[in-house]
Image (tube, rainbow, N blue to C red):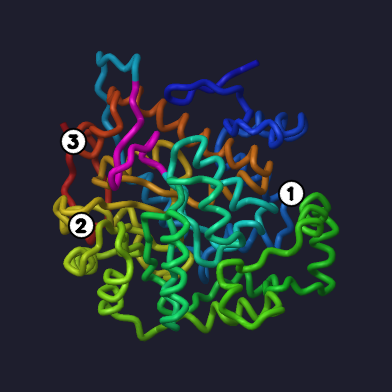
Amino acid sequence: MAEETLGARTIPEGGSAVSDTARRPGWRVSRRMAAAHSIDDLRRMARRRVARIAFDYFDGGVESEKGMARNRSAFDDVTLFPRYMVDVSVRDSSVELFGKRYAAPYGISPTGLGNLAWPGTDLAIARTARARNLPFVLSTPASTDIETVAAAAPGQVWFQLYVPRERRVREDLLRRADAAGIRVLVVTVDVPIPAKRERDLRNGFVLPLRLNARNLLDLATHPEWSLATLRAGAPRLRNLLPYVPQRSGAQTLAAFMAEQIAPSNDWSLLDDLRRLWPHTLVVKGLLTAADARIAVERGADGVAVSNHGGRQLDAGPAPLHALPAVVEAVAGKVPVLFDSGVRRGGDILKALALGASFVFAGRPTLYGAGAGGEAGVDRAVGILLDEFDRALGQLGCPRAAEINRGGVAWSANFPATAGRPTQVG
């Protein structure tokens, strides 16, 4: 059987690194996963297997989705210069972040309603993160609650907070995260108002899913997903259940979530969160040097350059274009994390070369879940790690920790507004 080598361990191609034998995939799933050689392969598989209304929810962006396209094309602007005659027989992908050593400088971004991709996706990602020793950021609108996910992957789960309008809700969410053993809080600041996601509007996406003629045909033509979702029950915003009236339906929960978005939030809110949260605090969704400097001045332990995967401001810059200016502004005071558009292990390396300390991606594991459940989640992670490891060797850079310390030469054909000179040699 062919094998893929991932860092210090080797696993069967298409197999899962999750050791629990009760969750080993059946032969059909294993065979399907063995045929997936890229994240794009998994995306195509998920698109065939998952109902369109669900697939479009996690695959889509905002308005015309040009921002999402820029996220991807920005990586084509960066060229890496390999060094040869370097001993790369032993490669070390591990890096340290916030006092913990991870297997690679890659983590799994927060994604709301993950179980829409496939029932049990949130827990599948958590278990894979634990097996692979990677961080997983659980979203506020996750379809599995904080306590359950944190228990499935102790020490690997971070919590992402959409700051609720109601103080009682935000304080209790932080209390629950702390009690569950979570030690990194990621505060998302790039959702001042709801976005216009046109795929969802065209599909009539609401919670609970509306069974009109179009959606019934969609479900009938995707029977595997439909039956699995019927057996598991429609995903709900489990973290928010304690804060709405009992026996509330999914529609009430979704309305409650929308009501909690606060356009009036300003930087004083970060001061309040800093007082409430005694552990590591990261501010996510920044795209300018000015905002990054303010976040650090207000007590952030890290900043994350991200445009929400192209799901908020369609006219905004690609995060990779914004990254160098943020890195320069922060000047090494805190780690700079990166998110949005990552589909290849080489993308991770490019973001690191431009100064990021750690790189996150969310859609790849959702594509994996849609394509093959938990085995697909692990396959997605395995593909990215394998590609990253190969890129290290090809570049003549045996240690991932050296990449953003000048260990990789690069040039970037960025727009003039990106404001960062080329670094080569």
Instruction: Write down the residue under mark 2.
Output: 325
The percent position of residue 393, horizontal first and vertical second, equals 35, 22
- Is residue 94 located in the magenta-colored stretch of the structure? yes
Which label belongs to residue 406?
A: 3
Amino acid type at circle 1 is Arg
Q: Mark 2 to mark 3: distance in Å?
A: 16 Å
Left or right for 364, reference 175? right
SS state under label 1: helix
Amino acid type at circle 2 is Ala
Q: Mark 1 to mark 2: distance in Å?
A: 41 Å
Instruction: Write down the residue under mark 1.
Output: 49
- State which quadrant residue 406 falls in: top left
The percent position of residue 50, horizontal first and vertical second, equals 72, 53
Q: Please give the name of the residue rendered at 17% of the width and 40% of the height, measured from the top-left corner.
A: 423
SS state under label 2: helix
- Compared with 197, 388 (above or below) is above
